[in-house]
């Protein structure tokens, strides 16, 4: 039989969780649009997409939060040039987000670590608790959009977001080649199983704009993301071409959308943002067919 002390501990944990659930619910009510940037495949540029999407929102006059839920390999601070900044934890244990710009707030586990080279060796429950705290313990305030950058796959981090932020919509990132599309199909199924809406699929690294002749070189083929979106019955958010300046952008910690607003790649982000806003205005969409069938 279960000991009385164990019963009391479970009851106490349940009560604490219920309180946190209510705090999370109230916090999320103040955020209009929640987007999870995700993919079943690593190396497709999710973090770069998340950073530039958040900056595209900001440049249109929206108040933005950028939440890095990649706990083992956070890269958002580096891409924004704020690796050296430490987030403040107040006496009441609330976490002050880093103000990247007025109206552009950032939270990442890396900003809480004194040793930037420290390994985060956590199992599922710890990761889930940390992500929940990133919502309950951070005074996000009123936001037009919260962009969340997830690690690759369909594991603890995107699962926790799906369960904690029930009205979040997924922005699924792929590259054009089949090896990426096969894993991204799993991401679409993941969203279906968890009743998470898909704001759309974006085809990243879709062609290289030659700086010499102006032509487009399809390094990884082209069109796979659009075909997958059609099969899945979800919006296609557009093709984002490769840009040699992305390397400089990442190393300098300045999003490309801010660094070179006239580039074809940035124009593709503007198209992507417009289509996401169209999705948000249309509201909930009916799920399409299973892309794996």
Image (cartoon, rainbow, N blue to C red):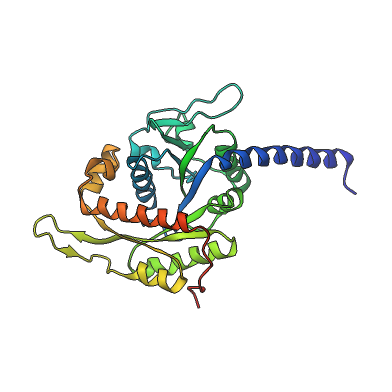
x and y percentages locating residue 59 in the rendered image: 32, 41
Q: Where is residue 198 in the image (x, y as percent from the top left)?
A: 48, 60
Q: List x then y, in percent, for residue 130.
A: 57, 40
Any part of residue 152 in sight: no
Q: Which of 129 and 141 is in front in this view?
A: 141
Asked whether the viewer can see residue 195, the reply is yes
Q: What's the residue at 21%, 44% (across, down)? A: 260
Q: Nearer the viewer, residue 91 or 21?
A: 21
Residue situated furthest left in the rendering? 213
Coordinates of residue 228 in the picture (x, y in percent): 40, 70
Total marks in image: 0
The residue located at (51%, 73%) in the rendering is: 290
Query: In the picture, residue 219 is in which quadrant?
Result: bottom left
Q: Which residue is drawn at 36% across and 51% down?
A: 49
- Between residues 94 and 28, which one lies in front from this camera angle? 28
In the displayed structure, does residue 126 sit left or right of residue 260?
A: right
Q: Identify the residue at horizontal 48%, vertical 51% (top origin).
A: 36
- Does residue 61 lie above or below 238 as drawn? above
For this view, does 267 lie left or right of residue 51? Answer: left
Q: Is residue 198 above or below residue 121?
A: below
Indicate left or right for 29 with 108 as reference: right
Task: In this rendered view, identify the residue nearer to me: 198 or 15.
Answer: 198
**Residue that sits furthest to the front in the current view:** 281
Res 215 → quadrant: bottom left
Residue farthest top in this picture? 91
**Quadrant in the rendering for residue 217:** bottom left
């Amino acid at each position: 039989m279960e000991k009385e002390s164990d019963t009391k501990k479970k009851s106490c944990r349940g009560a604490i969780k219920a309180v946190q659930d209510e705090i999370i619910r109230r916090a999320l009510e103040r955020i209009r649009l929640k987007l999870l940037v995700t993919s079943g495949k690593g190396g497709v540029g999710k973090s770069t997409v998340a950073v530039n999407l958040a900056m595209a929102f900001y440049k249109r006059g929206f108040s933005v939060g950028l939440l890095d839920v990649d706990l083992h390999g956070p890269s958002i601070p580096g891409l924004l040039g704020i690796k050296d900044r430490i987030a403040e934890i107040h006496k009441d244990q609330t976490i002050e987000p880093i103000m990247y710009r007025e109206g552009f707030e950032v939270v990442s586990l890396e900003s809480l670590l004194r040793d930037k080279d420290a390994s985060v060796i956590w199992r599922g429950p710890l990761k889930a608790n940390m992500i929940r705290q990133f919502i309950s313990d951070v005074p996000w305030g009123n936001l037009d959009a919260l962009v969340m950058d997830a690690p690759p796959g369909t594991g603890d981090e995107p699962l926790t977001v799906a369960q904690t932020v029930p009205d979040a919509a997924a922005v699924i990132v792929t590259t054009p080649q089949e090896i990426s599309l096969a894993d991204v199909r799993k991401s679409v199924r993941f969203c279906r199983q968890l009743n998470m809406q898909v704001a759309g699929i974006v085809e990243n690294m879709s062609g290289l704009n030659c700086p010499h002749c102006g032509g487009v070189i399809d390094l990884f083929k082209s069109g796979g993301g659009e075909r997958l979106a059609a099969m899945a019955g979800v919006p296609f958010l557009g093709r984002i071409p490769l840009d040699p300046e992305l390397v400089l952008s990442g190393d300098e910690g300045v999003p490309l959308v801010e660094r070179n607003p006239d580039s074809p790649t940035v124009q593709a982000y503007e198209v992507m943002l417009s289509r996401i806003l169209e999705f948000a205005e249309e509201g909930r969409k009916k799920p399409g067919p299973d892309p794996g069938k």
